[in-house]
Image (cartoon, rainbow, N blue to C red):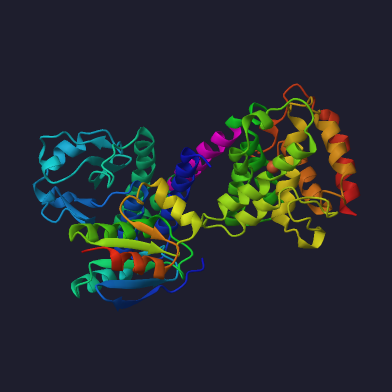
Amino acid sequence: MSIELKKALYNISALADLGQEITSEDNFTVKIQSVLHVIMGTFVVNRGAILWYEKTKDEITFIAKRGFEDASPACWETGQIMSLEKNEPRAVSGDSVLAGAGVAILIPLWVRDEFIGAVVLGDKFSAEAYSPEDLELLKVIAHQTAITINNHALFMGLSEKLEENRKLYEEMRRIYHDTLQAFAAAIDAKDVYTKNHSHRVARYSVAIARELGWNEHDVEGIYVAGFLHDVGKLVISNELLNKRKPFTSDELHEMKRHSLLSYKIISNIRFPWKDVENIIRHHHERLDGNGYPDALTREDLSDGVKILTLADSFDAMTTERAYREKMDIRTALVELRSCLDTQFDNKIMLAFCKVLEKEIKGELPEPNILPHLDRNFELSHITALLEGLIQELSQ
Amino acid sequence: MKSTAFNVASKCQGDAAVVYPRGYLNNIAGESLVSECHNVIGQGAKKIVLNFRETDFINSIGVSLLLNIIEDLNNIGGTLCFAEMSKIHRDTFEMLGLTKYILVFNDENEALQYLSTETS
Ligand SMILES: [Fe+2]
């Protein structure tokens, strides 16, 4: 594994750690102290603090810190900190009061138009400079920290602001997902033919899970599994991933390692959703036991696995690959049908057909499948087929 | 989510101390590891072996806590050894550039043997 990959994975897990801390039921002091530990562990610094802006006093005070024993933030110019770009990490210039206190990086925390406080960090333990990737990640973390502090302040103060609170949590979740999305893009970018594959598989899986009546928490879990199911491909060589000729048996063996590799990488991350790692591990299993890596059979496969398998295959069929042309949607549906009982589960196929039909009829406000399908394909050509499949599978 | 109650044990051996974190090093409960190291330093130990035999999970919070211990020992010119750390954590520490500040050994005895030959 390259150092960049290791670093990227460490950063993904740090975000998962952060997500866990800010959504934990710990009291605020413990929560904010834990958030500070996550930040310091992520960037390997031994001096760091989170500060809160007290509006009535126009002063900022420490709410969590390590190091900075002699610093007195009450003397720091709040006006100056507020004039900096919102939630943007910036290096502190050498001759300032802040630098004198040992601050190397300052991030002013804002939620919309509300100044919340700041995160300050000292130099890295290794004395290396902060990289542009560090600053990018720090920005995401700072934004989430700001929302956490603001939520707490809102919660303490005004119950009528509950609605806003809810929106802010939404915002926080969105940022978290945007970040996961960035990692999925890194996976898809390795293989020119699977551009956006992870993204589509995640959306298709969500559509099926919702149709099956899953709760929104579990739906989020399968969304994340869809995004990261092929993360193991980061370890497989580009030449092999983009090979146009058929694979030799050695090469095929190598390619098949990716689901287990994905599992190994993902199982080191503690997600707030259960089973993400197992769904990923088994996304190439089949009902008839001819899949990999564990050759499981129907009874051993969870609905989550069955959803991801179908979503993955449908997208693979309907997009072009290095070694073959893409199928049209009708052909792909017929192909899926012919593999029921051997590869795909009837119940999942039924849910997929139903949700696709609803999307075509315009019954769903936010379609997950349609926007990704071939625009040149006349959808009316498959309505009869879908109806037939639904009838057949409902029996 | 499942979390294992974290606790710490330690023993002194000459001018060295062996400290055993037990359980996941992934939340604020791990601060007891930092304070235990503080205690043994207070009792005169300048060499600490952290034995990770019973710690199979360390996240960014754990890294931050271990960084505190590295710093505490650095400040007194002491030596910090890690023993029985899993490959994945060893790799992480290497990637983070922290293996420069610690000595890594396969087991506790190896570490103690090394420390006994080191002049303090
Ligand atoms: Fe795959």
Looking at the picture, tell me which residue is in the foreground, B75 or A179.
B75
Residue at x-position 72% and y-position 59%: A302
Is A224 left or right of A22, judged from the image as shown? right
Write down the quadrant of residue B5 in the picture: bottom left
Tell me the quadrant of the picture where the C terminus of chain A can be found.
bottom right
Outermost residue toward the front in this view: B117
Is A167 left or right of A325, judged from the image as shown? left
Q: Position of residue A287 (x, y in %)?
A: 82, 54
Q: Position of residue A69 (x, y in %)?
A: 14, 56
Looking at the picture, tell me which residue is in the foreground, A102 or A273.
A102
The stretch drawn in magenta includes residue A178:
yes
Is A188 left or right of A314, judged from the image as shown? left
Can the viewer see residue A166? no
Task: Please tell me whether residue B40 is drawn above or below residue A29 in the rendered image.
Answer: below
Q: Which residues are magenta?
A: A172-188
Task: Please tell me whether residue A148 is drawn above or below residue B119 in the rendered image.
Answer: above
Q: Position of residue A116 (x, y in %)?
A: 26, 47
Q: Position of residue A184 (x, y in %)?
A: 56, 38
The stretch drawn in magenta includes residue A24:
no
Magenta stretch, main secondary structure, is helix
Looking at the picture, tell me which residue is in the foreground, A224 or A216.
A224
Write down the quadrant of residue A153 in the picture: bottom left
Outermost residue toward the top in this view: A376
Residue at x-position 34% and y-position 37%: A135
Residue at x-position 79% and y-position 55%: A295
